[in-house]
Image: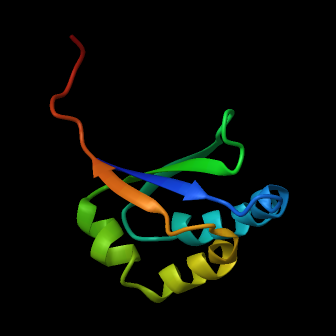
Amino acid sequence: MILEVAQLSIKAGQEAEFEAIFPAAAKVIAAARGYIAHEIQRGIESPSRYVLLVQWQTLEDHTPGFRGSPAFAEWRGHIGKFFESAPVVEHYQAPFHGTR
């Protein structure tokens, strides 16, 4: 499993509108091949910043899979107009399994 961590900076004053449209964008990503789950959290100290966590089966399911698909343009069409700057996206995977 791969965890995509995207930091989203939203234009000040447009947070409520972004949050209202996000469920439509979430439906697009949820239909993508390899999608497992997602969650979004809003910053407390910086309420115009959000972190989006998306679980993918493989890195390729996200990139080039989803990001190279027509669905990506649809996804960005829903929420891209709210971005103050380009999202910062990184991918993570667990270095080991189990507990310590």
Residue 83 image position (x, y, % from top left): 63, 68
Query: On the rendered image, what quadrant is the C terminus found in?
Result: top left
Residue displayed at 29% across by 77% down: 64
Depth check: give the residue in front, 51 or 98: 51
Total number of numbered discs in the rendering = 0
Residue displayed at 22% across by 20% down: 98
Residue displayed at 39% across by 59% down: 89
Residue 79 image position (x, y, % from top left): 66, 72
The residue lying furthest to the bottom in this view is 70
**In the rendered view, would you say 66 is above or below 49?**
below
Depth check: give the residue in front, 17 or 33: 17
Residue displayed at 26% across by 61% down: 59
Left or right: where 96 falls relative to 50: left
Residue 56 image position (x, y, % from top left): 36, 56
Tell me which colouring the rendered structure shows: rainbow
Left or right: where 33 falls relative to 87: left
**In the rendered view, would you say 77 is above or below 53?**
below
Depth check: give the residue in front, 98 or 13: 13
**In the rendered view, would you say 90 is above or below 81?**
above
The residue lying furthest to the top in this view is 100
Residue 70 image position (x, y, % from top left): 48, 89
Residue 68 falls in image quadrant: bottom left
The residue lying furthest to the left in this view is 96
Left or right: where 19 falls relative to 56: right
**In the rendered view, would you say 79 is above or below 22?**
below
Residue 21 falls in image quadrant: bottom right
